[in-house]
Image: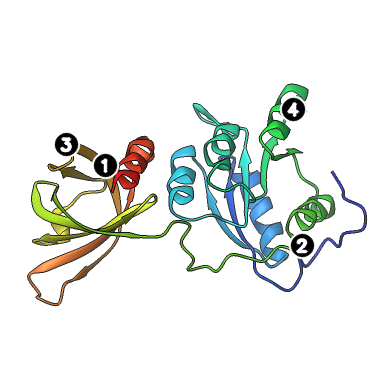
Amino acid sequence: MPVPGTPPVPIGDMTYHVLLVEPDPQSGALMERLLSSAGCAVERVTSFEDASRRLSSNCPDLLITAERLGPFNGLHLVIRYRAAYPDAPMVVTSKVNDRVLRAEVRQYGARFLKMPVRKHSFLRFISHLLTGRTPRPASARRWPRKYAALPATVSRTAGRIVDLSYGGLCLQFEGSPTDFNSPIHVALPSLGFEFEAFPRWTKTADSGSEWWCGAEVAPADTDSWRSVVDSL
């Protein structure tokens, strides 16, 4: 809905990072185009799983998610990450003006937006949510790292965890990363814990015989992984 007294474009003179979760290609393309025209840096994904992976490692300045995400509900994203990101504005969109959904969205500190969007009212709405906020640095990490030296098995290859956080971990291992599929299976024998992770970068160690790998923990293992991080 329009918010009186706020300009449609641009949204200040700062770049805000928006995570847009929209499986419908037409709606997603329209909102991405409008947000980009207002100077926002938009990362657009289409599934609950992809959104969870992004939110497990970084907090956007704004989350916009469709209500319907296959077998999941966009409100589940809000519920799952509201505790971790208490101040981040979140929006749930729906093609149906459902009063029950509106109430649930408000209950979890988010905003409801009826689809389809109209250019100027949509940008006024977004401007109202973001104006006056300080954008998060693109390189900022939501959670600090903990340094460790835990022995690990990475897809049956010997290695160890160098550091870790709620969002992911850094591994050091022997052999070549080309031997790994995505996701990779990581086992921590000393903790009796196994999980799946998605490699995001690799590089060779100074010795030349080992590799480093940064990886995000799979959404299905996130809660258990946080318990492991908290225990160290």
Say which label, 2 or 3, has the lower sequence index: 2
Disc on the earlier residue, 4 or 2? 4
| Residue corresponding to mark 1 | 196
Horizontal and vertical percent for residue 91?
68, 43
Crowd rating for badge 1 (residues with CA inside 10 Å; few <14, some 14–19, many 20+): many
Task: Find residue 199 and report its horizontal and vertical position in percent.
Answer: 28, 55
Left or right? Give the position of 171 relative to 133. Answer: left
Give residue 217's position: percent from left, percent from top: 33, 46
Q: Label 4 vs label 2: CA separation?
A: 25 Å
Pointer 2 residue:
131
**Label 2 packing within 10 angstroms: few (<14), some (14-19), many (20+):** some
Q: Could you give the CA–CA distance between mark 2 and mark 3, rounded to whole angstroms? A: 47 Å
Q: Which mark is residue 80?
A: none
Residue shown at 7% from the left, 70% from the top: 209
Name the residue: 62% across, 57% down. 61
Q: Which residue bears the numbered disc 4?
A: 103
